[in-house]
Amino acid sequence: MSAAAPRPGEALLSVDGISLAFGGVKALTDVSFDVRKGEIRAIIGPNGAGKSSMLNCINGFYQPQQGRITYRGVERRQMRPHEAAEQGIARTFQNIALFRGMSTLDNIMTGRLLKMKVPFFWQVWRHGPAMREEIEHRRFVEGVIEFLEIEHIRKTPVGRLPYGLQKRVELGRALAMQPELLLLDEPMAGMNLEEKEDMCRFILDVVRQYGTTIALIEHDMGVVMDLSDRVVVLDYGRKIADGTPAEVKADRRVIDAYLGVGH
């Protein structure tokens, strides 16, 4: 049973001594940090540093060989992605994972599947309780669509949309799950400056309006410094720095890792 919900500023998620290896290749080695409720927590590092592997451990896609993950005060053991989703952890990916032939509205509606409680019989017939439930979920999704300013593409198949709008739809699907913790894997990748500015604004508003806590991977250091409350830095699967954006930016180990000095 879950402990009492953490208050703003308290740890929502803690990873302690996480190590992950694939055969003889070490992806993560003894990594520890926490994510506080209500913050934007950045995870940065060079390519191959273990950032996505860490997110995969948090949402249950990978099972670390060592260490523990504590979420909402409860230590998790052998968590699977659907269990993480049920407990309020949502995820977006480096490579967009949408149903390209489905509309924006239908893609975002899939984020409500775990919220649907009406028995399958009623869902098939779309009658009675199922219809009332669908109307309720659709109302929430329409609110997400309005929030992300994508009303004009609500009926457009996402495969026809430009990359930046597809990224926004993927964010919308994650928000439709009403997550307490949202994991964003390179949300700005491949975007132009205007698209990045829009995404930054939406990420900040997600925290303010939805009360969502965010952990994100991002390579654009300007974005990281502007958005993040705290930053953890990985290099070759090990944590080399952890602190405020200003502290991390001035850390010699971080400078060396990014510039390649000593490697």
Image: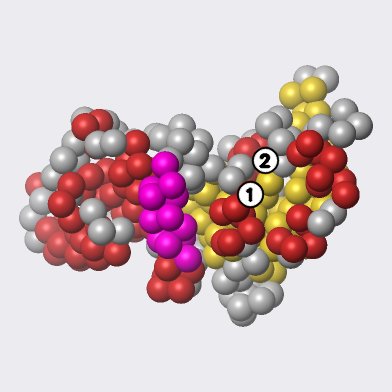
Say which mark, if any, is on residue 51: 2
Horizontal arrangement in the rendering, residue 183 relative to residue 36 (left or right): left
Q: Look at the image and give the residue range highlighted in magenta.
A: 192-204
Q: Is residue 181 above or below residue 25?
A: below
Residue sticking out furthest to the right: 262
Residue 73 location (% of width, % of height): 68, 67
Q: Residue at x 43, y 40 (%)?
A: 191
Residue 185 belongs to magenta span: no
* Alpha carbon distance from label 1 to label 2: 15 Å
Q: In terms of secondary structure, where does tag 1 sit?
A: helix
Q: Residue at x 84, y 54 (%)?
A: 251
Q: Amino acid at mark 1?
A: Met
Q: Is residue 205 above or below residue 31?
A: below
* Type of amino acid under label 2: Lys
The residue that label 1 is drawn on is 221
To which quarter of the image does residue 144 belong?
A: bottom left
